[in-house]
Image (cartoon, rainbow, N blue to C red):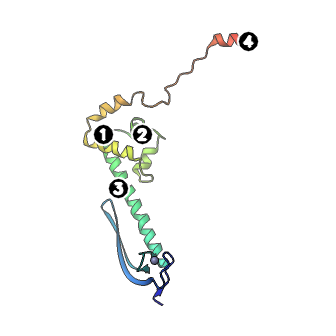
């Protein structure tokens, strides 16, 4: 049977089986081609359900592309950091905050850097002389360590007397 009722819009015999379809996924200039897919497509509403094995291949290709994108961004972050002559630790302290190994995780492509950090790095890539300004502006921009606690001995004396 080559047609069945659409489970999305309910059109009777709306879904038609297809075979041998190829698709190209692309992101950030990289591509992954998935060939020879089969599944069902509704002629009415466009709902597509890939056959099991193809669905797996499709989602594997998506995962792989996401990894490749993170890797590419990681390499870009590393290139810019080195161009600015910063260590990973300095970069975190100056620009992003967070754990001391955060930047190495970005560079290895394990985690996607926050958008604001990526934007900042790209701005510094284009205008490296702004790094000196960034250092000045970063003074006091982080509240951690900005508080001092002073114990008042007089108060202590008041409560004990
Ligand atoms: Zn449908």
Q: Residues within 10 Å of mark 3 (few under 14, many from 20)?
A: some
- Side of 70 relative to 52 (left or right): left
Q: Residues within 10 Å of mark 4 (few under 14, many from 20)?
A: few
For the residues labelled 1 and 2, say whether their Cβ atoms are less than 8 Å apart: no
Q: Residues within 10 Å of mark 2 (few under 14, many from 20)?
A: some
Q: Nearer the viewer, mark 1 or mark 2?
A: 2
Question: What residue does disc 2 label?
Answer: 96
Q: Specify which label sits upstream in the sequence, 1 or 4.
A: 1
| Badge number at residue 43 | none
Question: What residue does disc 3 label?
Answer: 72
**Residue shown at the point (61%, 14%) measured from the top left:** 152
**Residue shown at the point (53%, 22%) measured from the top left:** 148
Q: Specify which label sits upstream in the sequence, 2 or 4.
A: 2
Q: Nearer the viewer, mark 2 or mark 3?
A: 2
Q: CA distance from mark 2 to mark 4?
A: 46 Å
Q: Secondary structure at mark 2?
A: helix
């Amino acid at each position: 049977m080559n047609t069945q009722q659409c489970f999305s819009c309910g059109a009777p015999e709306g879904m038609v089986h297809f075979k041998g379809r190829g698709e190209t996924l692309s992101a950030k200039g990289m591509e992954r081609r998935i060939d020879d897919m089969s599944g069902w497509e509704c002629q009415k509403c466009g709902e597509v359900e890939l056959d099991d094995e193809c669905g797996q291949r499709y989602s594997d290709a998506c995962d792989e592309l996401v990894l490749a994108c993170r890797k590419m961004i990681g390499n870009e972050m590393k290139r810019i950091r080195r161009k600015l002559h910063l260590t990973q630790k300095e970069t975190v302290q100056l620009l992003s905050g967070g754990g001391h190994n955060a930047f190495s995780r970005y560079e290895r492509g394990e985690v996607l850097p926050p958008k604001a950090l990526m934007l900042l790095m790209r701005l510094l890539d284009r205008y490296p002389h702004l790094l000196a300004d960034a250092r000045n502006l970063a003074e006091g921009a982080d509240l951690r360590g900005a508080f001092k606690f002073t114990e008042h001995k007089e108060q202590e004396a008041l409560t004990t007397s």
